[in-house]
Amino acid sequence: MPLTESHFQELRKIVGNENVLTAREDIIPYEFDGTAALKHRAEVVILPANTQEVSACVKFAAAHKIPVVTRGSGTGLSGGSVPSEGCLVLCLTRMDKIISVDAANLTLRAQCGVITANVDAAANTHGLFYPPDPGSMKISTIGGNVAENSGGLRGLKYGVTRDYVMGLEVVMPDGQIARLGNACVKDVAGYSMKDLFIGSEGTLGIITEVLLKLLPKPAARRTMLASYDRMEDAANTVSAIIAARIIPCTLEFLDRTTIGCVEDYAKIGLPRDCEALLLMETDGHPSAVEDEAAKMLEIARAHRARDVRVASNDAEALKLASARRSAFSALARVRPTTILEDVTVPRDQLATMVGFIAQVAKKHNLLVGTFGHMGDGNLHPTFLTDERNADEMHRVHLALEEIVDKTLELGGTITGEHGIGLAKKQWLKRQLGEASHGLMRRIKHSLDPHNLLNPGKIFD
Amino acid sequence: MRGSLKELDYSILQQCMRCGMCLPACPTYDATKRERHSPRGRISLMRSVADGELKITGEFVAEMSYCLGCLACQTACPAGVDYSNLLETARSDIQTHGPRATLVARFWRAVTIRGLFMRPRLLRFAGRCLGLYQQLGLQTAFRKLHLTKLLPPHLKKLEPQAPTMARRFSHQLIAAVESPLQGKRHRVALLTGCVQDLAFSAINRDTADVLLANGCEVYTPPIQPCCGSLHAHNGEAEAARTLARRMIDLFPPSEFDAIISNAGGCGNHLRHYGQLLAQDPTYITRAKLWDTKLRDIHEWLIQIGCRAPRPGVAALTVTYHDSCHLTHGQKVTSQPRELLRLIPGIKLVELPEANWCCGSAGIYNVTQPEQSELLLNRKIDHILRTGAEVLATSNPGCHLQIARGLQAAGSNIQMLQPVTLLARAYKSEQSAGR
Ligand SMILES: Cc1cc2nc3c(=O)[nH]c(=O)nc-3n(C[C@H](O)[C@H](O)[C@H](O)COP(=O)(O)OP(=O)(O)OC[C@H]3O[C@@H](n4cnc5c(N)ncnc54)[C@H](O)[C@@H]3O)c2cc1C
Ligand code: SF4
Ligand code: SF4
């Protein structure tokens, strides 16, 4: 049922005229998120200012059975905030206030639309930090991070978004406002409901406020970059480091194709003929960091690292880290369409998986650069393609199928941090199995019986 | 090239992967948090036009005009999207296929962009008249009598912002060829610009002086065409091409080691003649060579190892504002700062948000006065808080805009360009030497 002017009038009463967008020029820019080749037009885009307005909009939508798609900054990589058929989009970027920083209890309370980097900046002014640092943190919203349970470059040591969420305020599918969790370090009062909403991709409720845990900033950090002739050697270095009881904050890798693209773009002086680069960082107490860094260097050399560059100061550290940080930019420039995948395997299978992806790319005559979080077993095979080339896109799909099969065979998951959304729902049941997939559906159905929140995402 | 969005090489539109990394860099998105006011949103509208899903509507036109063209999105974009090309194509498309502008608007467009700025002599003549108007106190009289009300709306808005005309233009200050006293190492051409020539001819003189002090023979023909950037930014692609050809004829690129521009906005346009004349078989080779020879003055000086002036000037705290097209367009960011640091006695303090647009943006302060004013105030706030005595920048548009803002704020911070500070330092060494 298409929405009519009278619907819009009702919505204008809730959020004010200028915050209800209906003109084509206003809503075309909300047709997509960061996922390649997906788009759909919403009926209306609404920009609420606070929880009450969100609740009122959801009540209105529930009364008229209008689907609601929640959107943060639209940087998602699985199509989560791409509009569903006949929906209204609730875009929460105006809800961007940091409510409080509690330096004594190490917590921060913020509205859902606060930009992730601003959370960290606010923590910084108190000598604290917010560890999850997704590559998109300069623009992603904290609500989007919670809804996707986003990770970052420091996941190995510091975990992912879930590990920092202490409490949530959520607008339920019927418009009621629920507060879940609290500021206590320990809390076993009933089910851990907040955990249900973390990673729920806007399908169970709308997160309007978050209470986050912060950490004291580590005093020291050491950065090094090692190059290898075989991916296995890099992977073995990682396993050996962890076996030596060292948990570095960052263990990131680039494969040969990615190294070549980074060198073309950033000209850092990377060896083009090596098979793997490993960026290693350890942080913490200065003497512990020194000690760990020395051991990591030794382990890398023992695993046939061709060369290890150790940063002697912050500027050099930044330069080494830029090899990894510019990976995505460097790849994205090569062809018009960039498809970023997110498969994850147990850490000890990572080298096998990287090798397999390279083989599949060759077989289907595709350009694929792989980089990612080696310490987490999380890979980002990045397909460099052109969406207008139907034949090439077909080959991409074939390759993806094979990669998914292999991932599951190795005991992995189809997504480590980008979520299911629209892009990966076809494989979800294959990974979960009937029982577990059915359980998820039942939870969705009991919370949202009319399937109004983000319909078509995660499940068909 | 620069025809319509539909004819544009589609991969330029497609290159935007909609990642959103440009959003935090965009001043108009920052102001409204509306996706259509973001680079990603604008590109999606352009793509809809190219795909035939959207016509060139009034709202589309309004959106393209709300964009500052500051190109901060280009610096932020990981995928290397050529936003400058997209925006110029969209604006050119609007000129040819958009809704007809009003008769008055078209008349003034014809007079200014297609008239004055195509004819250097006429432009100088107009500048001379404006100068007389200002110098003879007519401006004050005119305003007191409220006669400015009789001006067409466009000019009425522009009138108080019209730059004060220099008493002597560049050709009266710089000889056609000037050689360094000793040690000629390079032969360069100096582009004097339009606004720069009329309002800031002294800066052109300073540029020549600094070049001479660094072993460059400077070639400055007295009559120079406009570079065409004004035309390209406003959708007049054909006029921009004509002007580019005239420039190449006047300055055969093979004859110079470098062709020097000292205005950020012009420079950014000037280094893309190859793209502009891509379809022109007679000019394309020379246009490409031209692009490789074009240098911003700061870039060139650092490249040839600018000589540090000897101590002599008084201590001075200076802060630097990046003009958008110099930093985002030409990626010349460190060089002006390096030049300032070369001058003994100058203490450079960083300006917060130094590369955030000041709202001048070509004729943006006339077409979008409100947004322009917000940006100007934000800039002035930052400048005042640095405690600097001098604000250095190197683009006539920014210079005029910020000077206006500082004046309105009652500040006595001086506005100077890095080349002026450098030229003064070289001069003071001569007088000290004597
Ligand atoms: C360049 C780039 C780098 C990236 N790097 C990483 C990375 O390192 N790690 C990582 O994990 N991800 C990464 N991502 C993916 C993406 O940025 C994250 O998923 C991010 O959390 C999305 O935030 P957003 O505000 O853009 O949300 P959106 O894309 O707008 O929404 C994402 C999903 O969350 C839902 N949602 C949004 N806000 C709310 C809310 N308040 N309540 C309920 N549901 C909501 C939406 O419905 C949608 O399903 C990257 C993306 C890009 C483009
Ligand atoms: S040119 Fe400036 S105003 Fe226009 S989209 Fe880019 S950043 Fe925004
Ligand atoms: S940063 Fe570049 S690729 Fe990303 S949305 Fe902006 S213009 Fe598009």
Image (cartoon, rainbow, N blue to C red):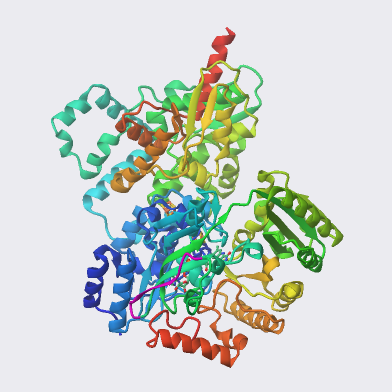
x and y percentages locating residue B366 in the rendered image: 30, 44
Left or right side of B105 for A316: right
**Residue B4 vertical placement versus B351 (above, below):** below
**Residue A402 vertical placement versus B265 (above, below):** below
Which of these two is toward me, B251 or B75?
A: B75
Q: Which residues are magenta?
A: A174-184
**Residue that protrudes farthest toward the bottom in the picture:** A434
x and y percentages locating residue A25 in the rendered image: 34, 66
Which of these two is toward me, B54 or B231?
A: B54
Q: Is residue A182 magenta?
A: yes
Residue A132 quadrant: bottom right
Which of these two is toward me, B65 or B131?
A: B65
| Residue A35 visible in rendering | no
Left or right side of A335 for B381: left
Left or right side of B346 for B94: left
x and y percentages locating residue A38 in the rendered image: 48, 75
